[in-house]
Amino acid sequence: MSDLDALKTEFLSAIAAASSLADLDAIRVDALGKKGRISGLLKQLGGMDPDARKQMGQDLNILKTEIAEAITTRQIVLADEAMAEKLASETVDVSMPSRPQRNGYLHPLSRTIEEISAIFADMGFTIAEGPDIEADYYNFTALNIPPEHPARQEHDTFYLQPDETGARPVLRTHTSPVQVRTMEANEPPIRIIVPGRTFRSDHDATHSPMFHQCEGLVIGPNIHMGHLKAVLIDFCRIFFGVDDLPVRFRPSYFPFTEPSAEVDIGCSREGGGLKIGAGDDWLEILGSGMVNPKVLENCGYDPEKVQGFAFGMGVERLAMLKYGIPDLRTFYDSDMRWLRHYGFVPSDVPALHTGLTG
């Protein structure tokens, strides 16, 4: 006991004399650490006879508790002293001007998606969403895309590891799977747009492995090509702000629409620049068509009773054309200088619930 009393006195004196938190922590390690002196005594208990081990164990635990409590008490005092010293030595000159705060800016992609959504909201469309990771069925099969189609190849599509059934999910290559999911879950009439991220194995000045699309779908009785043309002509003229913007529909092919059409808008390239509006040239901006009857059947609809049309557009492409952004890759560089140049004040963006007329 005399040895333990001496050890206790030694540590308590050292704790009381500690002048900094670092010194106090060194005492803690010396006393209670894994290789500390009290810990070393506890390891010696195994070689003692039972009665002596019991008494020594109790005494060591009491000593250990007293030392820990003394360290905690001294730690509070030293922490308060350190804070008081810091407050006394560090002052703030309240007369100095504050740091300049820069305004936040909305990314051109967010602005474009909100603007597209607002235009179609005025036409009665609602927004639908779906998963970025899709089953092969929703991304390809239900959309009448055959197994030999190039889009199913590894060099075009990002495939994930097989699931428990052996099927390989994909990062969706378009937002069209949401059209299928919406038709499976709802009865006509349907009028939706689907903005969202898509993924393809491509990367250059006009292509990105991740990009954004906005697709639209209208399903109901007696829907025809005239409805499709009216919706897209109005959209193009409102989005680009040109009331008499020339719009033409050029025959094309997509597996999920029949007939299909590319949509071109009038433009002029005089002087090496691009001006959207009246001119002697055309610029393709989106694809469209009447929903293929096979897609309707895959979704449980009777093509004899309902028809529909669909369209899809690249959000980055529309933003680049409207706001004069020359390189797609800069959208994802996270460069604040670029964002300050091309970004938008959030208050200038139309609210979805009011459209452009609210």
Image: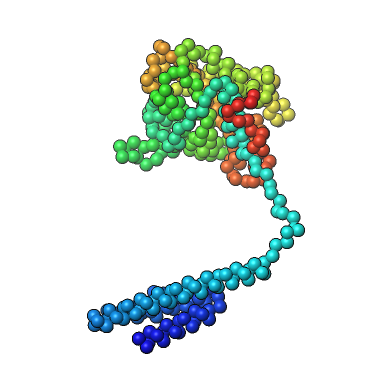
Q: Can residue 143 be seen at all in this image of the molecule?
A: no
Q: Image point 58% across, 16% down: which residue?
A: 230
**Total numbered labels placed on residues in the image:** 0
Looking at this view, name the residue that lies furthest to the bottom.
2
In the displayed structure, 259 sits above or below 51; it is: above
Q: Image point 39% across, 18% down: which residue?
A: 301
Depth order, front residue of 173/1: 1
Q: Quadrant of the C terminus?
A: top right
Depth order, front residue of 285/193: 193
Depth order, front residue of 26/336: 26
Depth order, front residue of 285/52: 52
Image location of residue 48, percent across then percent down: 26, 82
The quadrant holding residue 89 is bottom right
The quadrant holding residue 331 is top right
Looking at this view, name the residue that lies furthest to the left.
50
Q: Image point 42% across, 27% down: which residue?
A: 181
Image location of residue 116, percent across then percent down: 59, 28
Image location of residue 107, percent across then percent down: 61, 39
Question: Is residue 320 found left or right of 135 in the rendered image?
Answer: right
